[in-house]
Amino acid sequence: MHTAQLTDIPGCSYRTTLTGRVLALLLATLIMSCISPSPGPEVKGQERESLRIRTLPTSELAQQINTAEGQRMLADLLFAGLQALDNDRLLTPLDDNAHARFQRVLAYDPDNAIALRGLQDIVARYLELASEASRQGLFDEAGVLLDRARFVDEEHPGIVTAARELQIERDSGDLFFSFDSSGLAARSDAVRNQLVQVAQQARQHEAFFLITAPTDEQGRWMFSIMKEAVPGYRLRGNIELAGRAGIRLRMPQEPERGSNSQMLEAINRE
Protein backbone atom coordinates (compact mmCIF):
# COMPACT_ATOMS: atom_id res chain seq x y z
CA MET A 1 0.00 0.00 0.00
CA HIS A 2 1.42 3.37 -1.07
CA THR A 3 2.37 5.81 1.69
CA ALA A 4 2.90 9.51 1.07
CA GLN A 5 3.54 12.63 3.08
CA LEU A 6 0.76 15.20 3.25
CA THR A 7 2.71 17.53 0.98
CA ASP A 8 2.76 15.00 -1.85
CA ILE A 9 0.11 12.30 -1.88
CA PRO A 10 -0.29 10.74 -5.33
CA GLY A 11 -3.06 8.19 -5.96
CA CYS A 12 -2.23 4.57 -6.13
CA SER A 13 -3.94 1.19 -6.24
CA TYR A 14 -2.82 -2.39 -6.11
CA ARG A 15 -3.35 -4.46 -9.20
CA THR A 16 -1.60 -7.73 -9.85
CA THR A 17 0.07 -7.28 -13.26
CA LEU A 18 0.85 -9.91 -15.83
CA THR A 19 4.64 -9.78 -16.10
CA GLY A 20 6.40 -9.96 -19.43
CA ARG A 21 7.78 -13.38 -18.58
CA VAL A 22 4.34 -14.76 -17.78
CA LEU A 23 2.83 -13.32 -20.94
CA ALA A 24 5.69 -14.71 -23.01
CA LEU A 25 5.23 -18.20 -21.59
CA LEU A 26 1.48 -18.02 -22.08
CA LEU A 27 1.91 -16.81 -25.67
CA ALA A 28 4.32 -19.66 -26.36
CA THR A 29 1.74 -22.13 -25.07
CA LEU A 30 -0.93 -20.66 -27.33
CA ILE A 31 1.39 -20.81 -30.37
CA MET A 32 2.20 -24.45 -29.67
CA SER A 33 -1.47 -25.27 -29.50
CA CYS A 34 -2.08 -23.58 -32.86
CA ILE A 35 0.72 -25.39 -34.75
CA SER A 36 0.14 -28.84 -33.24
CA PRO A 37 -1.88 -31.26 -35.42
CA SER A 38 -5.54 -31.58 -34.51
CA PRO A 39 -6.86 -35.00 -33.40
CA GLY A 40 -8.94 -36.87 -35.94
CA PRO A 41 -12.63 -37.68 -35.65
CA GLU A 42 -11.91 -41.10 -34.14
CA VAL A 43 -10.12 -39.54 -31.14
CA LYS A 44 -13.01 -37.16 -30.53
CA GLY A 45 -15.44 -40.03 -30.63
CA GLN A 46 -13.37 -41.96 -28.11
CA GLU A 47 -13.32 -38.94 -25.77
CA ARG A 48 -17.12 -38.67 -25.90
CA GLU A 49 -17.43 -42.31 -24.93
CA SER A 50 -15.12 -41.98 -21.86
CA LEU A 51 -16.83 -39.27 -19.84
CA ARG A 52 -16.91 -41.30 -16.66
CA ILE A 53 -14.67 -40.06 -13.83
CA ARG A 54 -11.46 -42.03 -13.47
CA THR A 55 -7.86 -41.51 -12.41
CA LEU A 56 -5.53 -41.22 -15.36
CA PRO A 57 -1.99 -42.60 -15.23
CA THR A 58 0.85 -40.17 -15.70
CA SER A 59 1.65 -41.43 -19.17
CA GLU A 60 -1.91 -40.89 -20.35
CA LEU A 61 -1.98 -37.38 -18.88
CA ALA A 62 1.21 -36.55 -20.74
CA GLN A 63 -0.28 -37.82 -23.98
CA GLN A 64 -3.37 -35.64 -23.54
CA ILE A 65 -1.32 -32.51 -22.77
CA ASN A 66 0.85 -33.05 -25.85
CA THR A 67 -2.18 -32.77 -28.13
CA ALA A 68 -3.36 -29.49 -29.59
CA GLU A 69 -6.55 -29.73 -27.58
CA GLY A 70 -4.56 -30.28 -24.38
CA GLN A 71 -2.34 -27.29 -25.05
CA ARG A 72 -5.38 -25.09 -25.70
CA MET A 73 -6.98 -26.29 -22.47
CA LEU A 74 -3.86 -25.40 -20.44
CA ALA A 75 -3.61 -22.00 -22.10
CA ASP A 76 -7.27 -21.27 -21.31
CA LEU A 77 -6.85 -22.36 -17.69
CA LEU A 78 -3.75 -20.23 -17.23
CA PHE A 79 -5.40 -17.19 -18.77
CA ALA A 80 -8.48 -17.63 -16.57
CA GLY A 81 -6.26 -18.07 -13.50
CA LEU A 82 -4.30 -14.90 -14.22
CA GLN A 83 -7.51 -12.96 -14.75
CA ALA A 84 -8.90 -14.21 -11.43
CA LEU A 85 -5.65 -13.29 -9.68
CA ASP A 86 -5.75 -9.81 -11.17
CA ASN A 87 -9.30 -9.34 -9.83
CA ASP A 88 -8.58 -10.72 -6.33
CA ARG A 89 -10.62 -13.88 -6.86
CA LEU A 90 -7.98 -15.83 -5.01
CA LEU A 91 -9.81 -18.71 -3.28
CA THR A 92 -13.39 -17.65 -3.92
CA PRO A 93 -15.83 -18.06 -5.56
CA LEU A 94 -15.42 -21.81 -5.51
CA ASP A 95 -16.14 -22.25 -9.22
CA ASP A 96 -14.05 -19.34 -10.46
CA ASN A 97 -10.88 -18.57 -8.53
CA ALA A 98 -7.18 -18.35 -9.30
CA HIS A 99 -6.10 -21.14 -6.95
CA ALA A 100 -8.42 -23.73 -8.52
CA ARG A 101 -7.29 -22.83 -12.05
CA PHE A 102 -3.59 -23.07 -11.25
CA GLN A 103 -4.02 -26.32 -9.34
CA ARG A 104 -5.86 -27.84 -12.28
CA VAL A 105 -2.99 -26.89 -14.57
CA LEU A 106 -0.48 -28.46 -12.16
CA ALA A 107 -2.51 -31.67 -12.09
CA TYR A 108 -1.66 -32.05 -15.79
CA ASP A 109 1.71 -30.29 -15.81
CA PRO A 110 3.34 -30.31 -12.32
CA ASP A 111 6.29 -28.17 -13.47
CA ASN A 112 4.27 -25.46 -15.18
CA ALA A 113 6.13 -22.24 -14.36
CA ILE A 114 3.16 -19.93 -14.80
CA ALA A 115 0.93 -21.93 -12.46
CA LEU A 116 3.64 -22.29 -9.81
CA ARG A 117 4.34 -18.58 -9.91
CA GLY A 118 0.61 -17.92 -9.74
CA LEU A 119 0.30 -19.78 -6.44
CA GLN A 120 3.13 -17.71 -4.99
CA ASP A 121 1.42 -14.54 -6.17
CA ILE A 122 -1.77 -15.62 -4.38
CA VAL A 123 0.15 -15.99 -1.12
CA ALA A 124 1.85 -12.62 -1.64
CA ARG A 125 -1.51 -10.93 -2.19
CA TYR A 126 -2.98 -12.46 0.98
CA LEU A 127 0.04 -11.27 2.95
CA GLU A 128 -0.42 -7.77 1.57
CA LEU A 129 -4.13 -7.76 2.45
CA ALA A 130 -3.34 -9.07 5.94
CA SER A 131 -0.80 -6.30 6.47
CA GLU A 132 -3.31 -3.69 5.33
CA ALA A 133 -5.97 -5.06 7.66
CA SER A 134 -3.65 -5.17 10.68
CA ARG A 135 -2.55 -1.57 10.14
CA GLN A 136 -6.21 -0.58 10.29
CA GLY A 137 -6.80 -2.50 13.52
CA LEU A 138 -8.78 -5.28 11.81
CA PHE A 139 -6.85 -7.98 13.60
CA ASP A 140 -9.36 -10.83 13.27
CA GLU A 141 -9.66 -10.22 9.54
CA ALA A 142 -5.88 -10.14 9.23
CA GLY A 143 -5.69 -13.52 10.96
CA VAL A 144 -8.21 -15.02 8.53
CA LEU A 145 -6.19 -13.73 5.58
CA LEU A 146 -3.03 -15.30 6.99
CA ASP A 147 -4.88 -18.62 7.36
CA ARG A 148 -5.80 -18.43 3.67
CA ALA A 149 -2.18 -17.81 2.78
CA ARG A 150 -1.22 -20.91 4.79
CA PHE A 151 -3.85 -22.94 2.92
CA VAL A 152 -2.17 -22.10 -0.37
CA ASP A 153 1.41 -22.64 0.84
CA GLU A 154 1.98 -23.20 4.54
CA GLU A 155 5.76 -23.23 4.06
CA HIS A 156 5.95 -19.76 2.50
CA PRO A 157 8.63 -17.85 4.48
CA GLY A 158 6.65 -14.61 4.47
CA ILE A 159 3.84 -16.06 6.59
CA VAL A 160 5.95 -16.33 9.75
CA THR A 161 7.08 -12.73 9.40
CA ALA A 162 3.52 -11.52 8.76
CA ALA A 163 2.20 -13.38 11.81
CA ARG A 164 4.89 -11.81 13.98
CA GLU A 165 4.05 -8.33 12.66
CA LEU A 166 0.36 -8.94 13.33
CA GLN A 167 1.09 -9.75 16.97
CA ILE A 168 3.17 -6.58 17.29
CA GLU A 169 0.24 -4.57 15.95
CA ARG A 170 -2.12 -6.22 18.43
CA ASP A 171 0.16 -5.22 21.30
CA SER A 172 0.83 -1.67 20.07
CA GLY A 173 -1.83 0.06 22.21
CA ASP A 174 -2.71 2.34 19.29
CA LEU A 175 -6.25 3.67 18.78
CA PHE A 176 -8.21 2.68 15.68
CA PHE A 177 -11.29 4.32 14.15
CA SER A 178 -13.37 3.05 11.23
CA PHE A 179 -15.72 5.12 9.08
CA ASP A 180 -18.91 4.34 7.21
CA SER A 181 -18.10 4.38 3.48
CA SER A 182 -21.43 5.84 2.39
CA GLY A 183 -21.27 8.52 5.09
CA LEU A 184 -17.74 9.40 4.04
CA ALA A 185 -18.76 9.66 0.38
CA ALA A 186 -21.64 11.97 1.38
CA ARG A 187 -19.46 13.86 3.88
CA SER A 188 -22.19 13.44 6.45
CA ASP A 189 -22.42 15.26 9.77
CA ALA A 190 -21.85 11.98 11.62
CA VAL A 191 -18.52 11.48 9.86
CA ARG A 192 -17.54 15.11 10.46
CA ASN A 193 -18.26 14.76 14.19
CA GLN A 194 -16.26 11.55 14.35
CA LEU A 195 -13.30 13.24 12.67
CA VAL A 196 -13.47 16.11 15.16
CA GLN A 197 -13.32 13.64 18.06
CA VAL A 198 -10.37 11.82 16.50
CA ALA A 199 -8.49 15.10 16.04
CA GLN A 200 -9.09 16.06 19.66
CA GLN A 201 -7.75 12.71 20.84
CA ALA A 202 -4.71 13.12 18.59
CA ARG A 203 -4.00 16.46 20.28
CA GLN A 204 -4.65 15.06 23.75
CA HIS A 205 -2.25 12.14 23.30
CA GLU A 206 0.15 13.97 20.97
CA ALA A 207 -0.35 11.03 18.67
CA PHE A 208 0.83 10.55 15.10
CA PHE A 209 -2.15 9.84 12.82
CA LEU A 210 -2.47 7.53 9.82
CA ILE A 211 -5.47 8.17 7.58
CA THR A 212 -6.51 5.43 5.15
CA ALA A 213 -9.08 6.20 2.47
CA PRO A 214 -10.24 4.79 -0.88
CA THR A 215 -9.31 7.99 -2.75
CA ASP A 216 -6.80 10.77 -2.37
CA GLU A 217 -9.62 13.34 -2.32
CA GLN A 218 -11.38 11.63 0.59
CA GLY A 219 -8.15 11.34 2.54
CA ARG A 220 -7.38 15.02 2.12
CA TRP A 221 -10.94 15.98 3.13
CA MET A 222 -10.67 13.89 6.30
CA PHE A 223 -7.44 15.65 7.20
CA SER A 224 -8.94 19.10 6.52
CA ILE A 225 -11.81 18.45 8.96
CA MET A 226 -9.38 17.23 11.61
CA LYS A 227 -7.16 20.28 11.11
CA GLU A 228 -10.11 22.67 11.55
CA ALA A 229 -11.11 20.88 14.77
CA VAL A 230 -7.84 21.72 16.55
CA PRO A 231 -6.87 25.28 15.57
CA GLY A 232 -3.35 26.22 16.54
CA TYR A 233 -2.26 22.60 16.95
CA ARG A 234 -0.06 20.96 14.35
CA LEU A 235 -1.33 17.52 13.47
CA ARG A 236 1.36 15.10 12.36
CA GLY A 237 0.69 12.13 10.16
CA ASN A 238 0.35 10.45 6.78
CA ILE A 239 -2.35 9.44 4.34
CA GLU A 240 -2.48 6.04 2.67
CA LEU A 241 -4.83 4.78 -0.04
CA ALA A 242 -6.71 1.64 0.96
CA GLY A 243 -9.98 -0.09 0.23
CA ARG A 244 -11.61 1.09 3.46
CA ALA A 245 -11.52 4.35 5.34
CA GLY A 246 -10.05 4.53 8.82
CA ILE A 247 -7.72 6.42 11.12
CA ARG A 248 -5.02 5.07 13.38
CA LEU A 249 -3.56 7.12 16.19
CA ARG A 250 -0.08 5.93 17.04
CA MET A 251 0.45 6.42 20.73
CA PRO A 252 3.84 7.87 21.73
CA GLN A 253 6.08 5.22 23.21
CA GLU A 254 7.15 5.79 26.80
CA PRO A 255 10.89 5.30 27.39
CA GLU A 256 11.79 2.14 29.22
CA ARG A 257 12.79 2.47 32.86
CA GLY A 258 16.07 0.74 32.18
CA SER A 259 16.96 3.30 29.55
CA ASN A 260 16.16 6.17 31.93
CA SER A 261 18.31 4.65 34.66
CA GLN A 262 21.23 4.27 32.27
CA MET A 263 20.87 7.91 31.18
CA LEU A 264 20.83 9.12 34.81
CA GLU A 265 23.90 7.05 35.62
CA ALA A 266 25.74 8.52 32.66
CA ILE A 267 24.84 12.06 33.75
CA ASN A 268 25.99 11.39 37.33
CA ARG A 269 29.33 10.02 36.09
CA GLU A 270 29.89 13.23 34.17
Image (cartoon, rainbow, N blue to C red):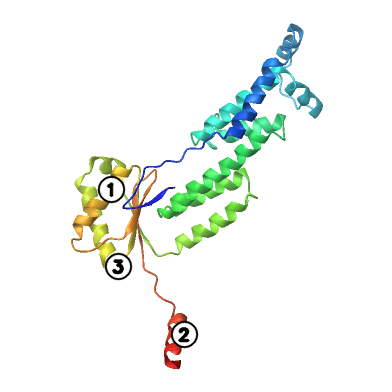
Q: Furthest-bottom residue in view?
A: 269
Measure the alpha-carbon separation of dots 2 and 1.
43 Å
With respect to residue 54, does 5 lie above or below?
below
In the picture of the structure, the residue carrying the numbered disc 1 is 220
User: 220 or 163, which lies in front?
Assistant: 220
Of the residues shown, which amino acid type is indicated by label 2?
Answer: Gln
Q: Residue at x 76, y 25 (%)?
A: 61
**Residue 139's quadrant in the figure?**
bottom left
Please, is residue 175 above or below residue 51 in the view?
below
* Mark nearer the N terminus (1 vs 3): 3
Looking at the image, is mark 3 or mark 2 nearer the viewer? 2
- The tag earlier along the polypeptide, 3 or 2, is 3
Q: Are marks 2 and 1 in contact (CB under 8 Å)?
A: no
Name the residue beneath numbered marker 3: 205
Percent across and percent down for residue 5 are 35, 53
Q: Earlier in the sequence, mark 2 or mark 1?
A: 1
Q: Is residue 256 left or right of residue 197?
A: right
What residue is disc 2 on? 262
Q: Amino acid at mark 3?
A: His
Q: Is residue 40 above or below residue 189?
A: above
How far across and how far down the image is residue 186, in percent? Answer: 23, 40
Mark 1 or mark 3: which is in front? 1
Q: Does 96 sit left or right of 222 as displayed? A: right
The local secondary structure at tag 3 comes to helix
Q: Position of residue 48 (x, y in %)?
A: 70, 12
Q: Position of residue 74 (x, y in %)?
A: 66, 25
